[in-house]
Image (cartoon, rainbow, N blue to C red):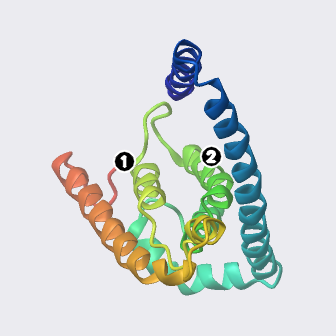
Amino acid sequence: MVHRIWGGMIVASVLFALLTGRVGPVSAAVFDGAKQAVQVALLLLAFMTFWLGILKIAEAAGLLWGLARLLSPLLRLLFPDVPKGHPAEGFILSNLSANFFGLGNAATPMGIKAMKELAKLNPRPGTASRPMITLLALNTASITLVPSTVIGYRAAYGSARPAEIIVPALIASTVGTVVALLVDRLFQRRAGDGPDGEG
């Protein structure tokens, strides 16, 4: 649907430019936009490469799995229906870690893998289970310490202090995560789920 909206806007802009004789400015805007897109993409690639490298090093050093053990009580609280030591735990933690560093593109594959593992535990295929809903809520409103993508955009567009967004982003994402979890639990209670409910 979105591609149709964007496509319609582009076609309408070109037609309007042809009708009003303003093809020159539209052509200049197209080339300028393409140039900026390449510049921003290269800068974002540098940020993504750096943080993905950090995550890979942490994974190879066993830090992610150590963090998983450390955060096991929290994961037990958030995902009581997932058996202890299940592969889904590691993928959930990797997803949350990537989101923590503002790497939404890196978080997505881990989230998909976590969902696949959670689907294996789902007693009702075709219906989202309680852990799947909780993961989706956490993934959507995850706490972000370093919003790498936003910092990259700000740096690309000439911000004097691109990293000053860190504190507001941390506050906003923390509030968003708390609200998402509260709403998740509220709807689970209204649906009549107990601690071991299926969701």
The three-letter code of the residue at mark 2 reads Lys
Query: In the depicted view, which residue is nearer to us: 7 or 100?
Result: 7
The three-letter code of the residue at mark 1 reads Glu
- As drawn, the label of residue 38 is none
Could you tell me residue 4's position as x and y percent?
54, 20
The residue sitting at 43% across, 40% down in the picture is: 128
199 vs 83, left or right, is left
Could you tell me residue 159's position as x and y percent?
56, 75
- How far apart in space, not on screen, are marks 1 and 2 (Cα)? 16 Å
Q: Considering only vertical position in the picture, is 14 above or below 48?
A: above
From the viewer's perspective, is the residue at label 1 or at label 2 nearer? 2
Q: Residues within 10 Å of mark 2 (few under 14, many from 20)?
A: some
Q: Quadrant of residue 18?
A: top right
Considering the numbered disc 1 on the image, is that residue within a helix, a strand or a loop? loop
Query: In the depicted view, which residue is nearer to us: 77 or 177?
Result: 177
Considering the numbered disc 2 on the image, is that residue within a helix, a strand or a loop? helix
Query: In the depicted view, which residue is nearer to us: 55 or 154?
Result: 154
Q: Considering only vertical position in the picture, is 189 above or below 154?
A: above
Task: Report the residue marked by disc 2.
Answer: 116
Task: Report the residue marked by disc 1.
Answer: 198
- Seen from this angle, which residue lies furthest left? 190
40 vs 126, left or right, is right
